[in-house]
Amino acid sequence: MPNYDYIIIGAGAAGLLLADALGKDEFFASKSILVLDKDNKTQNDRTWCFWEQGKGSFDDLVHKTWDSIYVGGQQLQKSTSIAPYTYKMLRGIDFYNHFLPKVKTYPNITWIQEEVTDMQEKENEVLVTTPSQIYTGKKVFTSLYDASIPAKQKEFPVLQQHFFGWQLKTDQSVFNPGEATFMDFSVPQKGNTRFMYVLPISETEALVEYTLFSEHLLEKTEYEESIKMYIEEKYNDTQYTIQETEFGSIPMTCYPFHQHNTNRVFHIGIAGGWAKPSTGYTFYNTSQQVPKLVSHLKAGKPLSEFHQRSRFMFYDMLLLDILYENNHLGHEIFESMFKRRKASLILKFLENETNLWEELKIVTAPKPMPFISALFKRLF
């Protein structure tokens, strides 16, 4: 059985960023590292978006940026600057084309395209099984997400941020490439939290996504019909062609995924709870977590101790409690936040960067009773 010091399962954002961080650090030059993924990473299978101030480490890969956003709904139509932040769009294919060849050049890293079918932790090693081989690793970093684990418990509600999108090319100039539609709640809510998300690349190109925060997924046709209806109403029934499609579902939960980490098996990305529970945004937090994890490894600390408690998790928990019990309140909460507070402050809060005074401003923007009720239920 081939043996490695580290095995990384999954070559998404978390897996490739971790592999790159280990590969370029001389500290790990003597470590043998295996990266396993079932895909060849040649498809544009996802889009990551994030916001940050000034220049960032992914700017050379970013496909498009916006300095202002639009938020709409029943009682809100607001175009606003997000300064000092910039909203950035990174296509999966551009990320893979940059990081995968780079990772493959590191002499101590082996890349193998195989699906992992089983993983067993033993006393001194971890067995990782694929259809053709069993690999052993001293430490395994896995991004394989098992949705059944949080679903088995009731203490932490589990919603999904699920979305279906079309990359469109229109025959007329209908989009504003200087402004991203962050949330448009003008679509029928149907008892859920539903909104459209539009990322214009040019006046004739945009990614248009129908997004929900809810417990259950929809049939594919319902996503598609909702996008069609939105385009007809918003863009005067313009003619278009669909260049690419995109579907995803991200768990929204405060379930403590870190409790499944051991000193040999460590969960990364969504499987490690690195997605922001209240929004589903994962990429930027992953890019922040990887350097911390590498420093943790270099310090020789046990993997099971890599976890930081945060008061922001409590805010997320209250919002998810509300949306789980009363999913239809989502649009009211987000609309009132953007109506009464600066977009830049909201984004700062969603990135867990605010101070207590700023957080008080945010939590007092929506109607207080749902939050008070959720707080009492959590406390008592």
Image (cartoon, rainbow, N blue to C red):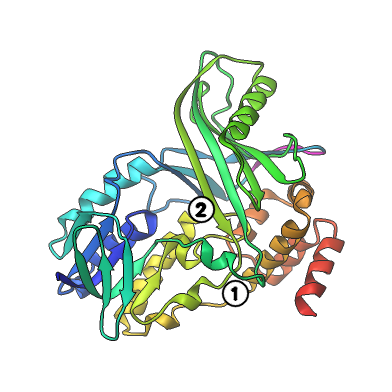
> What residue lies at 61% left-to-right and 29% top-to-bottom?
227
The residue lying at 55 percent from left, 73 percent from top is: 256
* Residue in the foreground of this view, choosing between 88 and 280: 280
Q: How many marks?
A: 2
Q: CA distance from mark 2 to mark 1?
A: 20 Å
User: What are the residue bounds of the magenta stretch?
Assistant: 75-81
Which element is circle 2 on? Answer: strand
Residue 163 sits in which quadrant? Answer: top right
Q: Position of residue 145 (x, y in %)?
A: 45, 61
In the picture, which quadrant includes the C terminus?
Answer: bottom right
Q: Position of residue 270 (x, y in %)?
A: 47, 60
Q: Nearer the viewer, residue 1 or 359?
A: 1
Q: For the stretch drawn in magenta, what is the main secondary structure?
A: strand
371 is within the stretch colored magenta? no
Q: Which residue is mark 2?
A: 52
Q: Residue furthest front?
A: 131
In the rendered structure, does residue 80 fall within the stretch colored magenta? yes
Q: Position of residue 110 (x, y in %)?
A: 17, 60
Quarter residue 78 falls in:
top right
Q: Quadrant of the N terminus?
A: bottom left
- Mark in front: 2 vs 1: 1
Q: Amino acid at mark 1?
A: Ser
Q: Nearer the viewer, residue 325 or 347?
A: 325
Numbered circle sitting on residue 260: none
Seen in the picture, residue 76 relative to 262 is either above or below; the reply is above
Residue under the point 55% across and 17% down: 173
Residue carrying label 1 = 310
Residue 205 is situated, as x and y percent measured from the top left of the image, at 49, 25
Give the secondary structure at mark 1.
Answer: loop
Q: Earlier in the sequence, mark 2 or mark 1?
A: 2
Asked if residue 91 is positioned above or below residue 356 in the image, the reply reads above
